Amino acid sequence: MPLSRAKKEVYLEKLRSYLDTYNKMFMVTVDHVGSNQMQQIRIALRKHAVVIMGKNTMMRKVLRKYLVDNPGHPYEQVLNNVKGNVGFVFTNGNLADVKTMITENKVPAPARSGTIAPNDVMVPAGPTGMDPGSTAFFQALNIPTKIAKGQVEIITELQLITKGEKCLPGQVVLLNKLNILPFSYGLIIIAVYDNGAFFSPQVLDMSPQDLQNKFMGAVAAVAAISLELGYPTLASLPHSISNAFQKIAAIGLEVEFDFPQMSLLTSGGGGGGGDGDAAPAAGGDDAPKEAAKEEEEEDVGLGGGADMFAGGDDY
């Protein structure tokens, strides 16, 4: 039944007020969710979040008017994703907590012919409670069975339906006969809005350590690209300084020029140990030179004395 003009105005004003009041929002799909279940979800979210549904045309109308009044607002990304049977869950609370409340409010449901399976469906091995006359039914579905104690028994567990495939009539009949409710339905989060950021709900499942690892990985990638291009950035600056210092130290070692910072390379970062080792090394280099000089002078003196007392030309 179409909404009256007055009710439309109330709805439009309510959605507009939510856009102004809340800075966080979940975009959800509500396929296969009944009115009673929706009421239970609203009760569970009370004091934490508000749920609003509506026709896509009306939601787009409010969002377009809001973007006209607030040009450049990130809600433009929300407008582009208002497709299908969707709704909004607004909150100013903790997104992870509200997400848990949304995902936990699901109810089991039977398979329906022609619907897309939201998950794989397994049929367990064991007795079915069906009489031997049903053997042909199982054979049509390629399900291995045997007769045990007067009833059909499934030999091994098998996957009857694959996620993303349509449920066939025979599969639905079998699940109903076995009293299996393979699916559970509730609000499905498809996107999250948080103070201007619009992202996938999987982000909320990441731990702080996961976020830190991804951030550091991105910083390392930026540093590597910057170094390769020779373009300095904050990420690459420490590496550039380190590389430059190593080149200067290599040149210093080659030309035998010492400077205090070189002790960081020879001592592994210990300045005191490097200085202590450097002094004896320097003294050790000078000592052989002085010893060689004294030995040379001694040899010269002995040579002159031999000529004087061993029959030189003058005597």
Image (cartoon, rainbow, N blue to C red):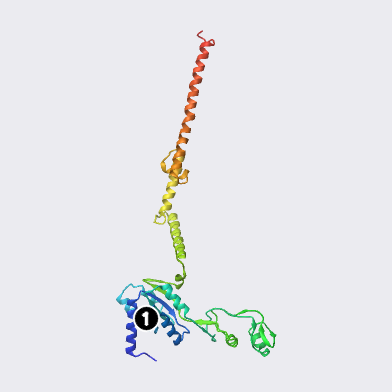
Residue placed at 46% from the left, 35% from the top? 282
Residue placed at 43% from the left, 47% from the top? 245
Q: Position of residue 313 (x, y in %)?
A: 52, 10
Secondary structure state at the residue bearing disc 1: helix
Residue placed at 43% from the left, 74% from the top? 97
- On screen, residue 175 versus residue 28, left or right, reads right
Number of on-image labels: 1
- On screen, residue 285 versus residue 125, left or right, reads left
Quadrant in which residue 211 is drawn: bottom left
- On screen, residue 102 versus residue 310, left or right, reads left
Quarter of the image with the N terminus is: bottom left
Pick whichever, 132 or 43, lies toward us. 43
Q: Which residue is mark 1?
A: 60
Looking at the image, can residue 142 be seen?
Answer: no
Up/down of 231 relative to 106, above or below? above
**Residue at the limit of the structure toward the bottom, as seen here:** 1
Residue placed at 45% from the left, 87% from the top? 36
Q: Position of residue 214 (x, y in %)?
A: 46, 63
Looking at the image, can residue 208 be seen?
Answer: yes
Name which residue type carries label 1.
Answer: Arg
Q: Position of residue 187 (x, y in %)?
A: 45, 80
Up/down of 256 relative to 5, above or below? above
